[in-house]
Amino acid sequence: MEKKERKIMVAVDESEESMFALSWSITNLISDTNNNSKLLLLYVKPPSAVYSLDSAGYIFSNETIHALQKYSTELATSVMKRAEAICTNFDATNIKIEKVVGTGDAKNVICSATKKLEADTLVMGSHGYGFFKRALLGSVSDHCVKYAKCPVVIVKQP
């Protein structure tokens, strides 16, 4: 009887913490003997604005909005290339990798993606924010621990 494919989703961004979480996942959750694992790399772009006001109340021009959208796409590509390089460094050639880029509020996109893609485990890096910063900014990982439809592993860098 064939074992069900195990899907490990790793939320990646431009931070060292997320790349460390990816390395940790490959080392600790995906073994060389288990060829039935798929690594889902998820990057979330911020929502693109049709129009936007800056702090002084000016509407950005179409060129500015286009430049911001281009930068966002280039950043997503760059993050995915870094993540792929980490997989290559681990000689993870036997691992099936699927890259997913979502757009929107990170905490909601991540939770939706775990459900839609039927992830078995979600792995996230911890930025190590203190109490006050978490209270002001909120914590994506705290939200995902509460609302994701699969086990969540938060990896802290030593």
Image (spheres, rainbow, N blue to C red):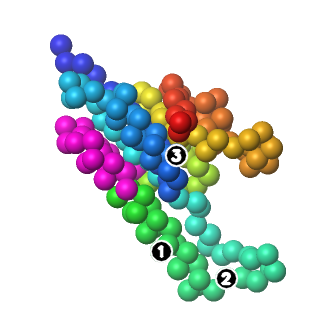
Q: Is mark 2 on a helix, strand or loop?
A: loop
Bounds of the magenta span?
Answer: 82-100
Position of 102 compared to 88: left or right? Answer: right
Q: Does the magenta stretch include residue 102?
A: no
Q: Nearer the viewer, mark 2 or mark 3?
A: 3
Q: How far apart are marks 1 and 3 (CA)?
A: 25 Å
- In the rendered view, does 155 fall on the left or right side of 23? right
Provide residue 67's location: percent of width, then percent of height.
53, 80
The amino acid type, in three-letter code, at marker 2 is Phe
Tag 1–tag 3 contact (CB < 8 Å): no
Disc on the earlier residue, 1 or 3: 3
Q: Report the amino acid beneath label 3.
A: Glu
Which residue is under mark 1?
Answer: 70
Picture quarter containing residue 40? top left
Name the residue rendered at 58%, 60% in the picture: 46
Q: What residue type is labelled 1?
A: Lys
Residue 17 — which label? 3
Q: Mark 2 points at which residue?
A: 60
The dot on residue 30 is none
Q: Distance between the residues labelled 2 and 3?
A: 33 Å
Q: Dot 1 lies on which element?
A: helix
x, y percent for residue 51: 66, 75
Q: Quadrant of the N terminus?
A: top left
Instruction: Tell me the residue at 58%/78% (across/down).
Output: 65
**Is residue 110 depicted above or below 103 in this figure?**
above
